[in-house]
Structure formats: structure tokens, C-alpha cells
Amino acid sequence: MKLFDFVSEYPDEESCKIKFKAIRDKEGVVCRKCGGKEHYWKQDKWQYECKVCRTRTTLRSGTVMHGSQLPFRYWFIAMHLLTSTKKSFSALELQRQLGHK
Ligand SMILES: [Zn+2]
């Protein structure tokens, strides 16, 4: 995906948060207190709540975003740039390995 498409697909903080949550849902949230994997989603607080011990888990906790005050969108764009850079790097590397200029 090109950066422009990426930016238009995730135009604001809200869309990035929703996407980020979808990723966390897919990976699964683990309670840091009891290790429980079942959580309720608190829409108003944007937090998970453990079904067993009621410990709250924020969207950021346990991720690279933990402790960061950066908007989700910054992180998304940085991640996107990182992955696309890596790709172009390996394409260049491949060319080098094959002896092309
Ligand atoms: Zn728990």
C-alpha cells in the first residue's frame, strides 16, 4: 500500500484506534494480573476488562505503544514507513545479490 492510500484509509486517530483494537483482538489480550484471556470491551473507556479479576488493560499496554503518548496515527505511519522501507531494501539487496546495478 502506498503512503497516500494508507493515509486516506486511516484519515484520523479514531480509525487508527479501531484498527489497532482489531489487531489486538486478533492477537488476543492477556490479563497481566491473572493471565486470563477473556475480556470485556469497555467502549466508553477504550479499555479491556478481565472477566475474571476485572483488571483493566488499555489498548497500548503490552504493546510497543506502551508508555508512549504518541497518537496511534503516528505509530501507524511510522510502522508503515518501516515496513515499506524494509521491502525496498530487500528488493535492492536482492538486485545486488543477483549482480544487477
Ligand atoms: Zn485477570
Image (cartoon, rainbow, N blue to C red):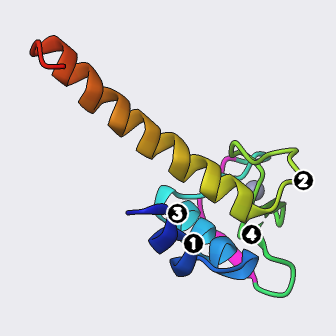
Q: Amino acid at mark 1?
A: Val
The residue singled out by tag 2 in the image is 69
> Where is 99 relative to 79, above or below?
above
Eye-nearest disc, 3 or 4: 3
Asked if residue 38 shows in the view, the reply is yes
The residue singled out by tag 4 in the image is 48
> Sequence-wise, which precedes: disc 1 or disc 4?
1
Left/right of residue 67 with respect to residue 4 in the rendered view: right
At horizontal 87% and vertical 79% (from top left) the residue drawn is: 45
Distance, label 1 to label 2, CA atoms, is 20 Å
How far across and down, in percent of the image, does residue 47 sit? 79, 71
Tell me which segment is drawn in magenta: 35-42
Distance, label 3 to label 4, CA atoms, is 14 Å
How far across and down, in percent of the image, does residue 98 sit? 9, 16
Task: Name the quadrant containing residue 96.
Answer: top left
The residue singled out by tag 3 in the image is 23
How far across and down, in percent of the image, does residue 52 sit? 73, 64
Task: Name the quadrant containing residue 57.
Answer: bottom right
Quadrant, the N terminus: bottom left
Q: Magenta includes 36?
A: yes
Q: Amino acid at mark 4?
A: Tyr
The residue singled out by tag 1 in the image is 7
> Sequence-wise, which precedes: disc 1 or disc 3?
1
